Image (cartoon, helix red, strand yellow):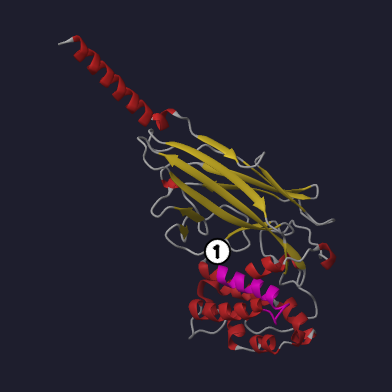
Amino acid sequence: MKRWHKRSIIIIAMGMVGVAALGLRPAMVPPTAKAITKAPHAETPLPAHYVTGGMKVTYRWELTEPPPHTVLRGAAGENVFGMVKPAQWEITIQAKDGKLTADYTTPILHAKNNTHSTATQYHAYFGAPVKYYLPSGYASLKYYLYLQCQSTLTPPFWQTAQCTTAVQLLCIDVAQGTVDLVPPPAIREDATCRIIRSGPTPDLPARFCGTEREQAVQHLLYDFADTARTPSGSRFRKFVQQAETAVQQYTAADLPWPQCWGDAAAEATRANTLIDATVRELRHHNYYGSAALKEFMDSPTFARIFGNTTEQEQDANPIDVFGTGTEGIIFEEIQDSHFAENEKNLQNH
């Protein structure tokens, strides 16, 4: 073989090695993970003298097994979180020293395929608090914590990188010590956005729990107590429509109340007791002058949800209002002066 032939073969071989090494570069780059803010921390102030009960909750989000209400955004058919090994994102929520805080980890995601690399970013932030009314008649605050994890997976040999963003929204009631994973508002599903409908139940001190019917009763109880204070607004009209739909969907037409609720009969009985304080107040104030509110409370739909509501001489025990699991909480009535109204959030939630 001639000398120039040998040199050509060596050059070609070296070029092939270089191209292969460059193509496999993602396999040589270690995965990364970081918070997009200076520190993995979020906080928002609490009203002065707000009773927190020393709330501290640690939420562990299994990124590869998203629970219901998780929103996934990315190119059609892609889900980076299905291409990585199991990983857990830990968020610690605490009420202390006049602040509600969220401190979180930034776990590294390792691709199942060793030739792929990942780069992950985490973000958590609080939205504006929202004032709402409880079945007991007391006012409270809802805080919303937005959680976002975005991971980009880079395959070898110049294949197109894939990126998926997972979003969750936690609704926090500090006074009660409850945390619920709720659907983010105004989300429209399409080819690049989908909402997880089924999956593991998150380990949270949730207000809304139990079977689907039991949760339906719980939502109707709290939503009515809150929206009935402004019966002339669109939120109340929307609630009435939701209530009628829920009664048609979840109750048996041939059974009396509360048996019509099936496995949620006990929850319906509990709702009948808890809604009493709200019912008495609405009647005392002549339904706030709303014919629509009085009509709904006299309707078969209302009776199918709450049964026969009667006035009692004494208020319900505040501890009973919130069910089991919150007996150690100290309750305090929150005055209107402690709240900054956020009408936009009230409409969304």
Query: Residue 136 appears at what percent x and percent y?
Result: 74, 71
Residue tagged 1: 210
Quick one: which residue is furthest to the front in this view?
4
Please state if 63 lies on the left or on the right of 49 as rendered.
Answer: left
Instruction: Quadrant for the N terminus, please.
Output: top left
Q: Residue at x 56, y 42 (%)?
A: 121
Query: Residue 86 appears at what percent x and percent y?
Result: 46, 42
Query: Residue 219 appears at what percent x and percent y?
Result: 61, 70
Residue 107 figure quarter: top right
The amino acid pointed to by label 1 is Gly
Secondary structure state at the residue bearing disc 1? loop
Quick one: which residue is furthest to the left in this view?
1
Query: Residue 230 appears at what percent x and percent y?
Result: 72, 78
In the rendered image, the vertical position of residue 260 relative to residue 213, given as above or below:
below
In the rendered image, the vertical position of residue 21 relative to residue 56, given as above or below:
above
Please state if 267 lies on the left or on the right of 319 as rendered.
Answer: left
Q: Residue at x 63, y 55 (%)?
A: 205
Pick the residue in front: 134 or 150.
Answer: 150
Residue 230 in magenta stretch: yes
Prevailing secondary structure of the magenta residues: helix
Query: Which contiguous range is marked in magenta?
Result: 215-233
Residue 333 in magenta stretch: no
